[in-house]
Amino acid sequence: MLVAFNFRQEFYEYVGVKDVEMGREERAAAQELLFDGEVPQGSLLILMASVSCLDYNDYELRYESMNTKEYSPAALIATYPSEGEAPAGYGEMRVDDDVREMKSSGRPQRVFDMLEYFGNDILREAMWPKGKKVPEKTKPRRKEKASVNDISSLKGKRVKF
């Protein structure tokens, strides 16, 4: 899975997922990973891998996940900076555009506001101690989109990650 984080613009986006299926004792040949998703400007790209263990249920005639809270192996493979710097308002625009597309197409949301990220607020306070006027362009963004960032659209659907 390739995820883009833009901490300055306070959003993150799922760029793409690549599934590789293997049997229990099988080895996979080396592959080049190509993701079709658009890479957002000014982001930190993080490539992750996880293992989803499946076993066949003879009674229900389907595969079931054997992963548990205690056993769900995953790893960070690499990080890369994306090209360019995001212009002001870029994060909000990407989230809003994705929400509109999600509502019209019915697909799950891919771009999310970092509603609980306080890094930029901490930096602002460190740069402008109490009593000093904070420049307008560095004031905190609106954080009123909490209802958009829920996963109710995924209910009843199998999600691979």
Image: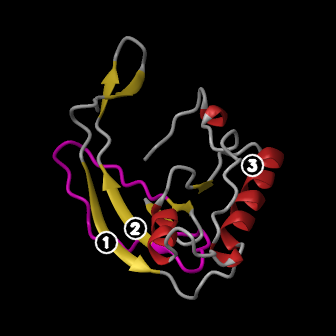
For the residues labelled 1 and 3, the Cα–Cα distance comes to 29 Å
Q: Disc 1 marks which residue? A: 78
* Range drawn in magenta: 17-44
Q: Residue at x 61, y 55 (%)?
A: 113
- For residue 21: magenta? yes
Identify the residue at the far right of this view: 104
Seen as rendered, the residue at the extreme left is 25
Counting from the top left corner in percent of width and height, residue 40 is at 60, 74
Q: Residue 58: image x %, image y %?
A: 34, 16
> Is 96 rendered above or below residue 29?
above
Q: Residue furthest bottom?
A: 84
Provide residue 129's location: percent of width, then percent of height: 49, 72
Residue 37 vertical placement versus 22 (above, below)? below
Secondary element under disc 1, as helix, strand or loop, is strand
Determine whether, in the image, residue 99 is placed left or right of residue 75.
right
User: Is residue 38 part of the magenta span, yes or no?
Assistant: yes
Q: Is residue 137 above or below residue 72?
A: below
Q: Which residue is mark 2?
A: 46
Residue at 77% x, 61% y: name it. 97
| Chain-order first, disc 3 or disc 2 | 2
Mark 2 in CB contact with mark 1 (< 8 angstroms): yes
CA distance for labels 3 and 2: 23 Å
State if disc 3 and disc 1 touch (CB < 8 Å). no
Q: Amino acid at mark 2?
A: Ile
Q: Quadrant of residue 68?
A: top left
> In the picture, residue 112 is in which quadrant?
bottom right
The residue identified by callout 3 is 102
